[in-house]
Image: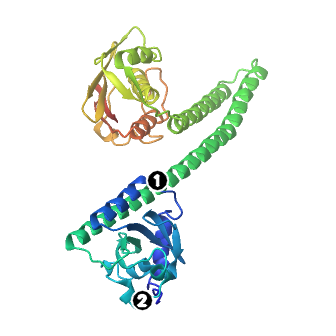
């Protein structure tokens, strides 16, 4: 018996193999289906998906064989992976100097014929083989070789999907940990900033009381500035917290609901006054998406449309269309509008245009950034068209 030599790039091959996390996993139907097809097509009693580990060959799937693994020195497949480009065929193991006295030939399972197709990944590493075995001398037809090669490619495709799913699961876990850390960071920053600002507001109120009978126009102006700045900082911190919570804790569980009923609920959350009209179409449309996320988007866009409207009579129009893959919404208003050069930055966090709303308050550039992040979270896109004094139209999609 001649054990197979170690491949030239064995360390790289093993490193690639371990990335698939396939060793010692439980049987899976998709792999068992392939070995069963291989056995039937080749009319062989034994068919195996063999993975070559450091010192063993382990069978991901096996037909006609009881043992789940053997030592690598005994493995026919350890020879097969030496030439990843070729099918290794042993017509009669008793006549082959590499195998004639191999315990797998002289004893159970009494291998006589062997054919193995290397399982080669995209980097050229042979991870193992798809092999068929007979108890008597035999040979494969060209058609059988072509079919086995196709089945081997399918196995590698399954392995690649498995690796990608593991990578995605790991990335998701890392992102969840990062989001948790960002949540904690946001709360710490909020406490460290809001606490001194609150103390500063209390101090200005106390100073006013103490020096109430000592009029000083300049001093009062400074106190007013300190108080206004402190309130602005607290408002900004609250906005950051709201942004963080909206993105990280957005419930993306999809439900089915009627758009008209949804909009009735949204109207209750909007600061609409008698000088505003809000119209929407598609009231009878059934939607299947995250009600929570859509509510956050619609309420944010409509609230902005109300706040930044300088007309005597404000108008907001919401439209809904759909195709096979997505829902398409528009939220249009007749408000202040924006300059063309401003449209490229309005979705950036903390981006403001230096414009005060109808109540003479300045924004902090958080709301539209939150909207964009939520739209992206739902596999959608958002854009805006606007013209000064004529209003804006936001268009966004949500994947079904």
* Label 2 Cα neighbours within 10 Å, binned few <14 / some 14-19 / many ≥20: some
Colour logic: rainbow
Q: Earlier in the sequence, mark 2 or mark 1?
A: 2
Where residue 112 appears, as percent x and y from the top left, is 38, 79
Q: Residue at x 59, y 49 (%)?
A: 177
The residue indicated by pointer 2 is: 98
Q: Are marks 2 and 1 in contact (CB under 8 Å)?
A: no
348 or 138: which is nearer to us?
138
On the image, which quarter does residue 34 sit in?
Answer: bottom left
264 or 48: which is nearer to us?
48
Residue 275 higher or lower than 215, as above or below:
above
Whole-number angstrom distance, CA of label 2 to CA of label 1: 43 Å
The residue indicated by pointer 1 is: 168
179 or 174: which is nearer to us?
174
Where residue 326 appears, as percent x and y from the top left, is 30, 34
Where residue 292 appears, as percent x and y from the top left, is 47, 27
Looking at this view, name the residue that lies furthest to the top. Answer: 274
Of circles 2 and 1, which is in front? 2
Looking at this view, name the residue that lies furthest to the right. Answer: 210
Q: Quadrant of the C terminus?
A: top left
Where residue 75 appears, as percent x and y from the top left, is 46, 79
Determine whether the residue tagged by mark 2 lies in a helix, strand or loop. Answer: loop
Determine whether the residue tagged by mark 1 lies in a helix, strand or loop. Answer: helix
């Amino acid at each position: 018996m001649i054990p197979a030599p170690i491949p030239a790039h064995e360390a790289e091959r093993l490193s690639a193999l371990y990335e698939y996390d396939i060793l010692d996993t439980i049987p899976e139907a998709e792999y068992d289906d392939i070995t069963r097809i291989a056995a039937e097509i080749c009319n062989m009693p034994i068919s195996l998906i063999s993975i070559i580990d450091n010192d063993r060959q382990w069978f991901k799937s096996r037909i006609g064989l009881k043992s789940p693994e053997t030592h690598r020195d005994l493995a026919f497949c350890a020879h097969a992976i030496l030439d990843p480009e070729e099918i290794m065929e042993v017509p009669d193991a008793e006549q082959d100097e590499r195998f004639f006295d191999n315990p797998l030939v002289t004893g159970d399972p009494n291998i006589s014929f062997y054919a193995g197709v290397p399982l080669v990944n995209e980097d050229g590493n042979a991870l193992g083989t798809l092999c068929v075995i007979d108890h008597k001398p035999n040979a494969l037809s060209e058609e059988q070789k072509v079919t086995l090669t196709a089945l081997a490619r399918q196995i590698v495709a399954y392995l690649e999907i498995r690796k990608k799913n593991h990578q995605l699961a790991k990335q998701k876990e890392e992102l969840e940990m990062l989001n948790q850390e960002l949540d904690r960071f946001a709360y710490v920053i909020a406490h460290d900033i809001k606490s001194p600002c609150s103390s500063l507001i209390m101090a200005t109120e106390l100073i006013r009381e103490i020096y109430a009978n000592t009029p000083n126009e300049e001093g009062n102006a400074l106190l007013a500035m300190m108080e206004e700045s402190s309130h602005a900082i607290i408002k900004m911190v609250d906005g950051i917290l709201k942004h963080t919570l909206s993105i990280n804790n957005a419930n993306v569980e999809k439900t089915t609901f009627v758009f008209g009923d949804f909009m009735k609920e949204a109207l209750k959350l909007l600061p609409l006054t008698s000088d505003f009209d809000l119209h929407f179409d598609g009231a009878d449309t059934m939607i299947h998406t995250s009600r929570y996320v859509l509510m956050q988007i619609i309420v944010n866009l409509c609230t902005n449309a109300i706040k930044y409207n300088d007309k005597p009579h404000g108008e907001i129009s919401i439209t809904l269309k759909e195709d096979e893959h997505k829902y398409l919404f528009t939220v249009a208003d007749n408000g202040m509008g924006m300059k063309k050069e401003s449209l490229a930055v309005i979705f950036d966090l903390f981006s403001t245009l230096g414009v005060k709303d109808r109540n003479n308050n300045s924004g902090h550039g958080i709301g539209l950034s939150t909207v964009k992040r939520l739209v992206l979270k739902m596999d959608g896109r958002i854009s805006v068209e606007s013209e000064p004094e004529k209003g804006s139209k936001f268009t966004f999609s949500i994947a079904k």
